Image (cartoon, rainbow, N blue to C red):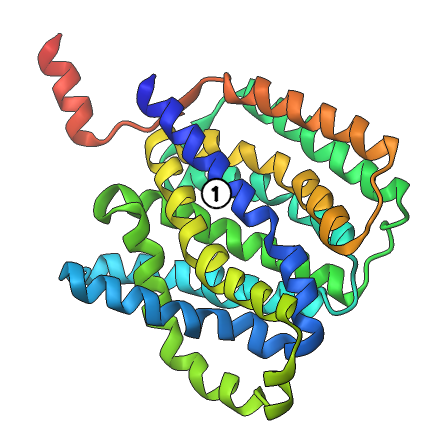
Amino acid sequence: MEKEKLGLLLGLVGVICFSLTLPFTSISVEYFGTTVVGLGRTVIAAILVGMILIVRKEKIPTRPQLKSILIVTMGAVLAFPLLTSWAMETLPVSHGAVEVALLPLATAGIAIIRAGERPSLKFWISSVIGAGAVILYAMHLGFGKLQFADLALLAAVIILGFSYAEGGKLSKEIGSWQVIAWAIVIGAPFFVIPVGMNFSVEMLHAPIQAWIGLLYLAIVSQFLAYVAWYGGMALGGVARVSQLQYIQPFLMIVFATIFLDESITIVTIITAIIVVVSVIVGKNAPILKKETPAEQIEKMDLR
């Protein structure tokens, strides 16, 4: 129970940090563009991460582990940052927030296969209620008509769901921060050239809030938030901790109100309450894990 509580706490810290990602992306992409914001954050983060890996003399992952890290790289380091940066050029943060809210369902579903977890019926019912509330909220605000930016966000959610599930599983082997650290180190060299080609001298004169946003995306969103998130999933279980993501879109809307002057309506508050209740119910739902052959043999021996 203590491990689970700590896992949920770390997951919550990660969610709060991730909740500032779209608002800061919206601020930064106006001045730096999609490529610099989407991929440049990884290049910046790689400087910090590389030094940490060298100082700690971390062991290079094995070949099977590198395959899993590559999945994390494709989702958390490449696809999600790039697709969300492109979408935030045309969509308001509140629009992106309600679509990103579908991420828990994607993560939990993929977790069944990748992390060996089997969510119960109660878990799925609470997940459907939470996701349904988010969809109704989006329809109420007139977001029912999908644009190309919407499709980009939905694709980002699915790809990141794979990344989350794979990263949560791998973090049990090599540690939570090591997963995203190696993913950043692997991806950064491939991003240097496109970032350099899209960076201009004029960008050096971007306002301070744009630079703060870019540095936040690089240091916190791209690295520190994942350390807390993957650590939380390793301790509390991928499917269970993933439900905390239902809170994320509404935190995004709150932060968008603070930084971007977007308003909060009574519908937003009501939907937030429904979603938070579904998180509480789902958090307490039983999660079954597949037994490994070794565990099955051990049980038979005990009998």
Asked if one can make out residue 58 in the rendered structure from this viewpoint, the answer is no
Q: Is residue 124 left or right of residue 64?
A: right
Q: Which residue is disc 1 drawn over?
A: 14
Q: Residue at x 36, y 57 (%)?
A: 180
Q: Percent from the top left, x then y, of residue 287? A: 43, 23
Q: Position of 229 compared to 64: left or right? A: right
Asked whether residue 264 is in view, the answer is yes
- Left or right: 277 in relation to 16: right
Q: Nearer the viewer, residue 85 or 124?
A: 85
- Write down the quadrant of residue 2 in the picture: top left
Where residue 31 sits in the image (x, y, percent)? 68, 77
Quadrant assignment, res 123: top right
* Residue at 39% over, 36% down: 232
Q: Position of residue 70 (x, y in %)?
A: 36, 64
Going by the numbered disc 1, the residue's amino acid type is: Gly
Q: Residue 164 in the image: state x and y as whole percent.
A: 45, 48
Task: Classify 229 as above or below 25.
Answer: above
Point out the image quarter for the N terminus: top left
**Residue found at x 31% / y 54%:** 179
Frontmost residue, 177 versus 284: 177
Residue located 38% across and 30% down the image? 7
